[in-house]
Image (spheres, rainbow, N blue to C red):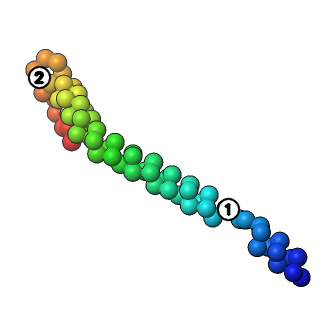
Amino acid sequence: MLQYMQRITRAKNEDGASAVEYGLLVAAIAAVIVIIVFALGGLIKSAFSNTCSSIQTNGSGLTTSGSCS
């Protein structure tokens, strides 16, 4: 019985530690994605607005009936 107890106390289960590490890694990746979206969001929005207005004027100054939102 003593040998069994010693074997249990010596056995190291690191599954919980690796799960925490993976959780922190996923949280860090999500934070980086959110930062990138907020940093580049305005730039991308203006690019799409410029493209939409170019398509609306049809290149000739005539506006079409569609709307850009």
Q: Is residue 29 above or below residue 57?
A: below
Of the pair 64 and 31, the residue shown nearer to us: 31
**Quarter of the figure with the C terminus:** top left
- From the viewer's perspective, tell me whether residue 15 is left or right of residue 35: right
Q: How far across and down, in percent of the image, does residue 68 sit?
A: 20, 37
Task: Say which amino acid is labelled 1.
Answer: Glu
Q: How far across and down, in percent of the image, does residue 52 sit?
A: 22, 31
> Which secondary structure, mark 1?
loop
Question: Which of the 4 image quadrants contains residue 16?
Answer: bottom right
Q: Nearer the viewer, mark 2 or mark 1?
A: 1
Q: Are marks 2 and 1 in contact (CB under 8 Å)?
A: no
Task: Say which amino acid is labelled 2.
Answer: Leu
Q: How far across and down, in percent of the image, does residue 38 sit?
A: 28, 45
Please say whether residue 52 is visible from this viewpoint.
no
Q: Residue furthest top?
A: 60
Of the pair 66 and 2, the residue shown nearer to us: 2
Mark 2, other Cα within 10 Å: few <14 / some 14–19 / many ≥20: few
Of the pair 7 and 42, the residue shown nearer to us: 7
- From the viewer's perspective, tell me whether residue 1 is left or right of residue 12: right
Residue at 44% x, 51% y is 28
Residue at 27% x, 35% y is 44
Mark 1, other Cα within 10 Å: few <14 / some 14–19 / many ≥20: few
Q: How far across and down, in percent of the image, does residue 33 sit?
A: 39, 45
Residue at 56% x, 56% y is 21
The residue that mark 2 highlights is 62
Ranked by sequence position, the earlier of labels 2 and 1 is 1
Q: CA distance from mark 2 to mark 1?
A: 67 Å
Of the pair 29 and 59, the residue shown nearer to us: 29
The residue that mark 1 highlights is 14
Question: Which of the 4 image quadrants contains residue 2?
Answer: bottom right
